[in-house]
Image (cartoon, rainbow, N blue to C red):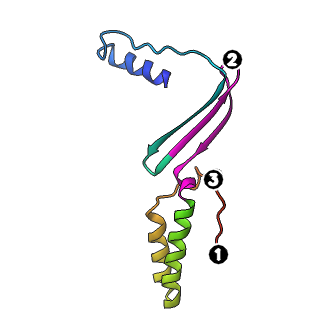
């Protein structure tokens, strides 16, 4: 973030504040957790730093992970609706439609928050 702020100042040539943008940065040991609303939902950052300020652990929880239960419920509901019709096209279209409502990013979802039970 500090690098980005400094780059903005350099690119803008100091026009934003009449001079360079300075960000006071104190290196501290500890755990830093933050959440932000992103395009797909909640994004949680969890960082741990040592005494030199080096990041020693990172845990990112992306929106897809937060939405697992809702995704499971939507897929199960769509399957229960379309399975009795015995039409594979309707089933696939219904399940695909339900899944696209969440726009999951499965490559980013590295671990589950809770337990998924696909029954």
45 in the magenta segment: yes
Q: In percent of the image, x 52 and y 64: which residue is there? A: 70
User: Depth check: 69 or 108 in front?
Assistant: 69
Q: Is residue 100 left or right of residue 73?
A: left
In the depicted structure, whether residue 75 falls above or below residue 16: below
Going from N to C along the chain, the mark reached first, 3 or 1, is 3
Q: Secondary structure at mark 2?
A: loop
Q: Is residue 86 visible?
A: no
Which residue is the site of mark 1?
119
Q: In percent of the image, x 59 and y 53: which residue is there? A: 107
Q: Which residues are magenta?
A: 43-67
Q: CA distance from mark 1 to mark 2?
A: 48 Å
Instruction: Determine which quarter of the picture holds residue 68.
Output: bottom right
Q: Dividing the image into 4 quarters, which one contains the C terminus? A: bottom right
Q: Nearer the viewer, mark 3 or mark 2?
A: 3
**Residue ranking furthest to the top:** 19
Residue 90 picture location, percent across and down: 45, 82
Which residue is the site of mark 2?
52
Q: Is residue 69 left or right of residue 55?
A: left
Which residue is the site of mark 3?
113
């Amino acid at each position: 973030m500090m690098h980005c702020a400094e780059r903005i100042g350099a690119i803008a040539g100091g026009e934003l504040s009449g001079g360079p943008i300075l960000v006071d940065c104190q290196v501290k040991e500890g755990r830093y957790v933050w959440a932000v609303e992103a395009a797909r939902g909640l994004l949680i950052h969890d960082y741990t730093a040592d005494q030199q300020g080096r990041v020693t652990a990172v845990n990112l929880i992306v929106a897809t992970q937060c939405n697992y239960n809702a995704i499971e419920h939507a897929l199960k509901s769509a399957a229960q609706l379309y399975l009795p019709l015995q039409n594979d096209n309707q089933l696939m279209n219904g399940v695909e439609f339900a899944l696209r409502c969440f726009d999951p990013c499965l490559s980013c979802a590295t671990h589950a928050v809770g337990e998924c039970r696909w029954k």
